[in-house]
Image (cartoon, rainbow, N blue to C red):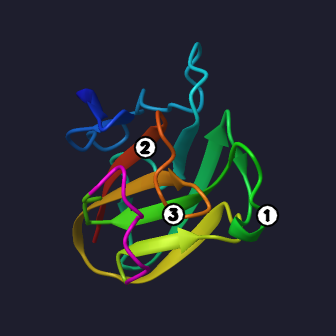
Amino acid sequence: MKNVMAMVGGLLVTGAICAAPAGAQSVRRPCTAQGSHQATACIMEPKEGATLPAGSLHVVLAAKNVSISPVAAAKPNGAHYHLLLDTDLESWTDPIPPASDHVVHLGQGQKEYTFEGVSSGQHRLIVVLGDNNHVPVAHQHADTTYFSVR
């Protein structure tokens, strides 16, 4: 599997550019990488290249070098997760788009979320850390995973 790291608007975005073969282990786990002191968001589930049953998609997240907290808490160095399912983030400097079927704001500090009604096919999930104004945190590592639903 080939991994990619790209700077976009001061944000380091990491992720695989193709799905891993069945049973392959992804080496892409920015939360376990050593040496970086940047805020980092990670998708722990679903695993890269996973094949999942249609219906519910359970997402488990982790973070490093940042305090995940509810928006109302407004902590220094605080952030919350934003999930983008099969959609792109248009700007890394403007607020993340409002919640929809494909964009989820976990503004209560949640570290898990379940999408309902996920259709069959190939999918991409991105997690981005947002500040209390829903603007992506500068100089962060965002994470992307590719998976399929049958």
**Label 2 is placed on what type of residue?**
Asp
Question: Which numbered disc, 3 or 1, marks the residue that appears first in the sequence?
Answer: 1
Q: Which mark is residue 73?
A: 1
- State the CA–CA distance, disc 2 to disc 3: 17 Å
Nearer the observer, 22 or 38: 38
> The C terminus is located in which quarter?
bottom left
Residue farthest bottom in this picture: 117
Q: Quadrant of residue 6?
A: top left
In magenta, the rendered stretch is 91-100
Q: Is residue 8 left or right of residue 75?
A: left
Q: Is residue 99 above or below residue 88?
A: below
- Image position, residue 84 (x, y; %): 37, 64
Categorize mark 2 by other alpha carbons within 10 Å: few (<14), some (14-19), many (20+).
many
- State the CA–CA distance, disc 2 to disc 1: 24 Å
Nearer the observer, 2 or 129: 129
Residue denoted by label 3: 134
Q: Specify whether residue 149 is painted magenta.
A: no
- Image position, residue 42 (x, y; %): 53, 44
Q: Is residue 24 left or right of residue 30?
A: left
For numbered disc 1, what is the local secondary structure?
helix
> The N terminus is located in which quarter?
top left
- Image marks 2 and 1: residues in contact by CB distance under 8 Å: no
For numbered disc 3, what is the local secondary structure?
loop
Residue denoted by label 2: 143
Measuring 59% from the left and 16% from the top, which residue is drawn there?
34
Question: Which numbered disc, 2 or 1, marks the residue that appears first in the sequence?
Answer: 1
